[in-house]
Image: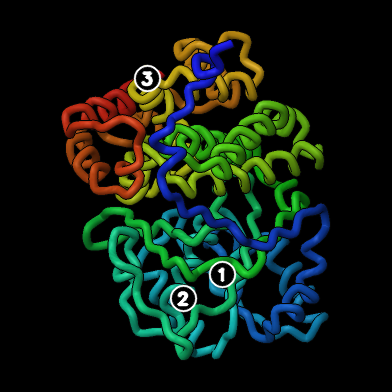
Amino acid sequence: MNTKNLFNLDETEILRSQDWFFSIPIKYGPGRLSEMGSFCESLNIKKPLIVTDSGSKELYFIENLKSILLESKVDSDLFSEISPNPRDDEIANGCRKFRLGKHDAIIAIGGGSAMDGGKAICLTANNDIPLWDFEWEKPAAKIGKDNKFPRLITIPTTAGTGAETESTAMVTHLEKKMKFCVTHPELKPSLTLLDPELTLKLPASLTAWTGADAMIHAIEGYCVPGFNPLCDAAALESLSLISKSLYLVLEEPDNLAARGAMLVASCLGGIAFIKGLGLVHAIAHMVGAEYNTHHGLTNAIILPTVLRFNLPNMDEKVKRMAEVMQFEDHSVDSFIFNIEKILDRIKIPKSLHEIGIPKDCAHRIAKKAMADSAFLTNPRIATLDEVLELVVTSINKSR
């Protein structure tokens, strides 16, 4: 038997030197927020700054967390001036509060904006390095013993962003009205806490939008070129869990097992996109930067348009994704059709115009998208005219 014909092994990729990394302690389980006092004690955290988004500051889990910490004699304070699309001025304000309060750690709790806000504050809290010196494409800033990053604990309360385990943060540059990725290889969460009970009260719309976001992270991360079996395995398991749980969690919002499966799927999606992302995110980042739209919802609307552009000639990867998502037909056209059915069923709008994006912004958004870090890892090279066509289609009718 000629096994070489059975498997499309890319010998060029598998023989190339690779650097893989993933070493984040993850605590998973219902009700484990109650252990935060002991977690802080084990990490020698005595005075953390809790960072959350403006929409979460009045929610029950913030007061619960503060009470749990107080019971363990951990003195905390709250910073909640983080927008749905975190801005550079908000990060500066968070840094000032961190320093004035003489805090020793950051606990980022909430959705993706809270995660990104907490990580971005961490980058500049203990040093005088400008935030934009941490931009993804720039050489890593030098961090010495005297200005090490504060300890970081991440606690997602939505199942979608996957931002809790990695070191990147998307921040809006107010002057340029663009989103940029800031990061540093030495910034890693000391602990990620996944407690599905924190997602039980999530409204149906946010459950759908963040669930779609998790699915898109897994799809885009898996389709990024390159050999990374850790990320690819995480992507496929994420898609498997989403195919079993997304509808269930919308039909039975109190189903803790389904909530847990979606939370784990989201986390795995975040691991998957360590490889990178693609044009869905490149476009959505710039739409969000200008119009402050919900990131997961924006991604979900754009997805079908980008799939039609990216997936032709990716038959093997499409087959693997279709298999784990239990689609009967494994062809590219059928995969896109089934993804569109999912978006229909979870009530995702069919155009960006429906969420207030004007048609005259298309050229501007397309140019900005090509400067996004996710554009560089898209599996298919795109010209400005091609990106413009994707943006125009997404505004008018993506599916």
Q: Earlier in the sequence, mark 1 or mark 2?
A: 1
Residue at 74% over, 59% down: 27
Q: Secondary structure at mark 1?
A: strand
Q: Residues within 10 Å of mark 2 (few under 14, many from 20)?
A: many
Query: Nearer the observer, disc 1 or disc 3?
Result: 3
Q: Amino acid at mark 2?
A: Gly
Tell me if label 1 and label 2 are in contact, CB under 8 Å: yes
Residue named by callout 1: 51
Horizontal side of 287 relative to 4 (left or right) equals left
- Relative image position of residue 52 (x, y in whole percent): 57, 65
The image's colour scheme reads rainbow
Residue named by callout 2: 94
Residue at 68% over, 40% down: 262
Horizontal side of 379 relative to 187 (left or right) equals left
Toward the viewer: 154 or 330?
Answer: 330
Q: Earlier in the sequence, mark 1 or mark 3?
A: 1
Residue named by callout 3: 308
The residues bearing labels 1 and 2 have C-alpha atoms spaced at a distance of: 8 Å
The residues bearing labels 1 and 3 have C-alpha atoms spaced at a distance of: 38 Å
